[in-house]
Image (cartoon, rainbow, N blue to C red):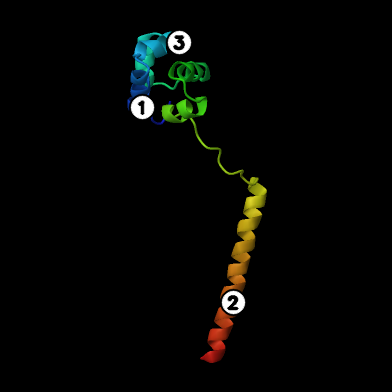
Amino acid sequence: MSLFFDADWFDAKLGERGLDRGALSEAAGIERAALHAIYLNERAASAAELDAFARVLGVDIVEVTLRSGVATRDAEPREDAAARIESIEARLDAIDSWLEEFERATKKSA
């Protein structure tokens, strides 16, 4: 399901071309009810439908994808679990060492 379909933007772009939502459904080969479900965020548009929308609106597919709410940025590459755990353990060891040194210094000054 899409996160947010920018219906106002799509309608404005259609209006600029003197078209209505029927032009989108016809170009995408879907019924108006299916297009309505996309507008209401009840279902996400397919890649082919987004491509058809872009052609009808005369805009870049990236813009259509972003405005339809289905585009997501790739997350930063994740480290594998073992490497992540090793990193966490190393940081905890460093914290433990710092705490031991702090406690020794505190006892000496007392």
- Binning the other alpha carbons within 10 Å of mark 3 as few (below 14), some (14 to 19) or many (20 upward) gives some
Q: Which comes sooner in the sequence, label 2 or label 1?
A: 1
Say what secondary structure mark 1 lies in.
helix
Say what secondary structure mark 3 lies in.
helix
Q: Residue at x 62, y 59 (%)?
A: 89
2 or 1: mark nearer the eye: 1
Residue 79: percent from left, percent from top: 64, 47
Q: Which comes sooner in the sequence, label 2 or label 3?
A: 3
Amino acid type at mark 1: Trp
Q: Is residue 77 left or right of residue 106?
A: right
Residue 21: percent from left, percent from top: 35, 14
As rendered, which of 22 and 97 lies closer to the eye?
22
Q: Are marks 3 and 1 in contact (CB under 8 Å)?
A: no
Q: Which comes sooner in the sequence, label 3 or label 1?
A: 1
Q: Residue at x 62, y 66 (%)?
A: 93
In this orientation, does residue 33 appear? no
Query: Where does label 2 land, which residue?
Result: 100
Amino acid type at mark 3: Ala
Query: Where does label 1 land, which residue?
Result: 9
Query: Where does label 3 land, which residue?
Result: 27
Residue 97: percent from left, percent from top: 62, 72
